[in-house]
Image (cartoon, helix red, strand yellow):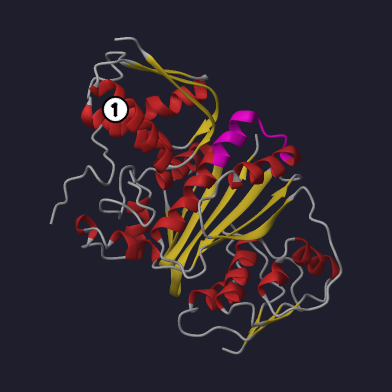
Amino acid sequence: MVSSVIVQSGVLNSATLGCELAAQVLEQLSLGASVHIRATDVSRVTPSFANAFVMTVLERFPDAFASHRCTIEADAWVDDAFVASMDRYARGIRLSGQRAICC
Amino acid sequence: MSVLRASGADAGDFVNGRLAWDILNATASHNRELPQTVDLRSCVMLKPYAVACLAAIGAKQKCGAELLLPDDARCAEHLIRINLPRWFRPMVLPAVEPRPTNVVADQVFDRSGDFSDQVVRSLAGELSLAVNVARDLASHLDEVVLNALTHAESPVGCVVVGQSFPGLKVMEIAILDLGQTIRGHLATNPQHRLIESDEEAVLLATTEGVTGTVGLNRWKEQNSGVGLFELRDYCERGNGELTILSGGSRVMFRVDGGPKPAHFRGRFEGCLVNIRFFAR
């Protein structure tokens, strides 16, 4: 299917925003489409945003980024924030809503 | 305690240990008693963390306490400039415009928006910060404010104050809440219910991936437990000094030799995060 493009800009600094972006991406991925996120006008990304976005997507589609079904176009420092979140996920770090509670 | 008299000698920071103990101790015990009068007449200088504490003391009393400004004209003017009297009984004061080196004291209750960017923009020029450093500072500030607002259950939200010291190439920012302490928050998560001390809680909270949040926080967001870790890591790589005072412990993180824990006599009912960012 034709790739859809989602444009982001400004400061991305809350988990809520990250989850909102993830929801848009997941909707497209669920339809079998690929998604391109154009974040070239994003000035900075906090770990909270990046983790909420990346980990929510990876929880449903573990290969979303590796398979390039979801691609991100951004300046290096913004891209670094997303790569760091992917690395955290690979090392077993999860969002609080994804963790198993050990009692 | 009806009167808090801050000593003139207590102007130091968390590195030299000559802290504003009178102010810290009064803030620590805010759940037991609050001063009706804050007497700063002998003060000659107050760092951002002390100003944050005083603002929180005033805020918790809904501006009903009396503030006696320093006899030292420069110190009094500085406190007016950063808006400390706002949280105390109204008094007639001269208008004093903030300087570019000041982050005027503010009480934050909701999402910080572009607050952190405003702070860093206002200070970065004074320190000639590189763009990437300013961006890092803003992101770290966002995360710490977010922690205070979503985890602490603080009755006064969180208080933020900052000051840059161009001569030292240092920016100092204090973020304070009067909530349940880091240990109190972490212990709400069954995974961390066996934490035995405030020091252990601070060290755990600054470990990657550790959060007290189970499911969603009070803003209905998920947490991942990396905000304080990232800030600690940033400081331990030589970019600053982070001190966290919470409950009976204060722990400093800096480039050399690992965390430096110290006992806080009494118990600080809340969490004070003090950061000294270095501009290189």
B200 in relation to B167, above or below: below
Count of numbered circles in the view:
1
A72 in relation to B190, above or below: above
Q: Which residues are magenta?
A: B127-138
Q: Residue furthest bottom?
A: B2
| Amino acid on which the number 1 mark rests in the picture | Leu
| x 42%, y 47%: residue | B228
Image quadrant holding the C terminus of chain A, namely bottom left
| x 62%, y 66%: residue | B50
**Position of B22 compared to A5: left or right?**
right
The residue indicated by pointer 1 is A26
**Position of A85 compared to B69: left or right?**
left
| x 51%, y 64%: residue | B157
Given residues B277 and A42, the one toward you in this image is: A42
**Position of B244 compared to B56: left or right?**
left
Image quadrant holding the N terminus of chain A, namely top left
Question: Residue B107's quadrant in the figure?
Answer: bottom right
Q: Residue furthest left?
A: A103
Given residues B12 and A84, the one toward you in this image is: A84
Residue B37 in picture, x, y percent from top left: 66, 85
Magenta highlight on residue A5:
no
Residue B249 in picture, x, y percent from top left: 41, 65
Secondary structure that dominates the magenta span: helix
Q: Chain of mark 1?
A: A
Is residue A11 visible in the rendered image? The answer is yes
Magenta highlight on residue B134:
yes
Residue B186 in picture, x, y percent from top left: 30, 59
